[in-house]
Amino acid sequence: MTRRISRKLPRLEHSEHPFVEGLDPMVPMLIVAAAVGAISSLAVELFRTAMYAIVQWYSSQEHLVAAARSLPLSARVAVPGVAGLVCGLGMWAGHRWIKRPRGPEYMEAVHVGDGVLPLGPNLVRTGSSLLGVSGGITIGREGTMIQFAALASSVLGRIFRADESHRRLIVACGAAAGFAAAYRAPIAGTLFVAEIILGGLALREVSAVLVAAVISLLTTQTFFVSGPLYIAHAVPRIGFNDLFDVALVGVAAGLFGPVFLWVLHTSNKRYQALFTFLPLRMGVAGLAIGMLAAVRPEVWGNGVSVLQSFLSTHWALSSVVAVFALRLIAVTFASAAGIPGGVLTPTLVTGAALGLIIGNTMLIPSADHSQTLWILVGAGSLLAATTHAPAMSALMVFETTHNYHVVLAALPACVIASVIGSLLRHQSIYTEALGLEEHGPAASAAARRTILPKALPFHLRTSAISANIAEEKRAA
């Protein structure tokens, strides 16, 4: 086994100049974070552009639901099946070629790893995911976008010859920047890293993550696309009378969230045991998704256009229930097959449908803003129930719509959903993905450590660095 010797990020040597001597090591890290933000935005846009090009190639449409509607019924069924089969063949062939089944994902690299994302396995995963999501597979493309951005930032960290602690922070910055570019939500992206990946960040470290997320969004808005991800009716000022409604949605999401996670976890074990050959497993899942899409074309894709349709048009209750049930089955198939992607956007869409169902059956429908409120609160609440990250979930529904008043309603609902969800199922969707139960105490210890060492006086810091370098040379 090749021994890996960590290399230190270049630091200022001792100098008599008062400015240099007093310079915090986080200052150059902020410059690196800005570069990570710009590169991550480009990585996300590259993936998005490639996906749109593939969809337009076979349908002349840009968005997946529109593509599904434009195709004959037989093609609507067949395309996801072919996409799943090709995705599986790509992963199977790629793994045999690089002789490495998988590399760590960005959460593992930051949470329990050393901040290194191997290039080969991650490129295979990104390419396979691109083929799958472009063919209408009901899985989130944003998860792969964030992974691709984190991969680019990991490469940048190795170019800068960063040590382990800085590599982990650079990949965390890449994840936040990828999140910001994918969802146009930099604050939620920062909290995504802080709440989910690390379970808490020191303020010094948050500054670097936030800089990366903001620069990523600025790059996206300047060169590619601007405005919020979703266009929604403005929600008027929230009063105490609205708290009962949103609390009811939060309770429902808190109860449904653990059921949703249990379905995903159980189906994953049973389905993968049924089909051991990866291309066959993904192809069958894609074909099942295509058959579901024959009933409702909204089954196709991650659900961005479905959520936008919820927010902008009136839906009959029966149609909402049908889309809710069919997409839930389709997401289960895609996740159980192991098709690379994420479930964050599908969770938002499922939560939005849940909020809309509750609003139209248990609450009093009134103005358009009420429906908007229930949709957004439902989306954020189910996300909080499955991720156990209420602050990120509430701010995300605000940033993706620029609807400020919804935060006052979403925050209490997300807290309620998160508390109920964590009580009924202690592991969130991301801690299960990290396999913390299998890692045990070692992972818990790794999760508690901070990304960067606490600030020390300059002379103590340089002495510690020198001692560390000398120790590594002796070990080598």
Image (cartoon, rainbow, N blue to C red):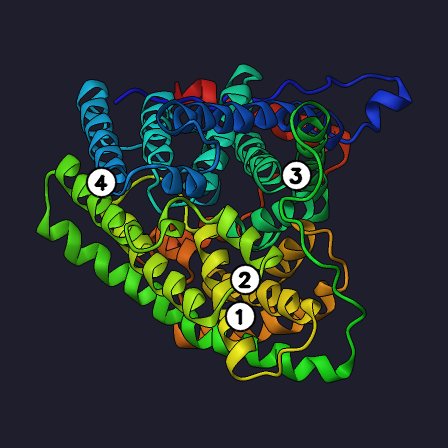
Quarter assignment of residue 206: top right
Residue type (three-letter) at the residue carrying disc 3? Val
Q: Identify which residue is drawn at 64% across, 46% down.
A: 190
Q: Earlier in the sequence, mark 3 or mark 2?
A: 3
Q: Are marks 2 and 1 in contact (CB under 8 Å)?
A: yes
Q: Earlier in the sequence, mark 1 or mark 3?
A: 3
Q: Earlier in the sequence, mark 1 or mark 4?
A: 4
Quarter assignment of residue 429: bottom left
> Is residue 73 visible to us here?
yes
Side (left or right) of 198 relative to 132: right
As rendered, which of 87 and 1 lies closer to the eye?
87
User: Foreground mark, 4 or 3?
Assistant: 4
Q: Return the residue at label 2.
A: 379
Residue type (three-letter) at the residue carrying disc 1? Gly
Label 2, label 4: how far apart the Cα atoms are: 32 Å
User: Foreground mark, 1 or 3?
Assistant: 1
Residue type (three-letter) at the residue carrying disc 4? Ser
As rendered, which of 398 and 173 lies closer to the eye?
398
Q: Secondary structure at mark 3?
A: helix
Q: Secondary structure at mark 1?
A: helix
Q: Return the residue at label 3.
A: 209
Mark on residue 74? 4
Q: Return the residue at label 1.
A: 355
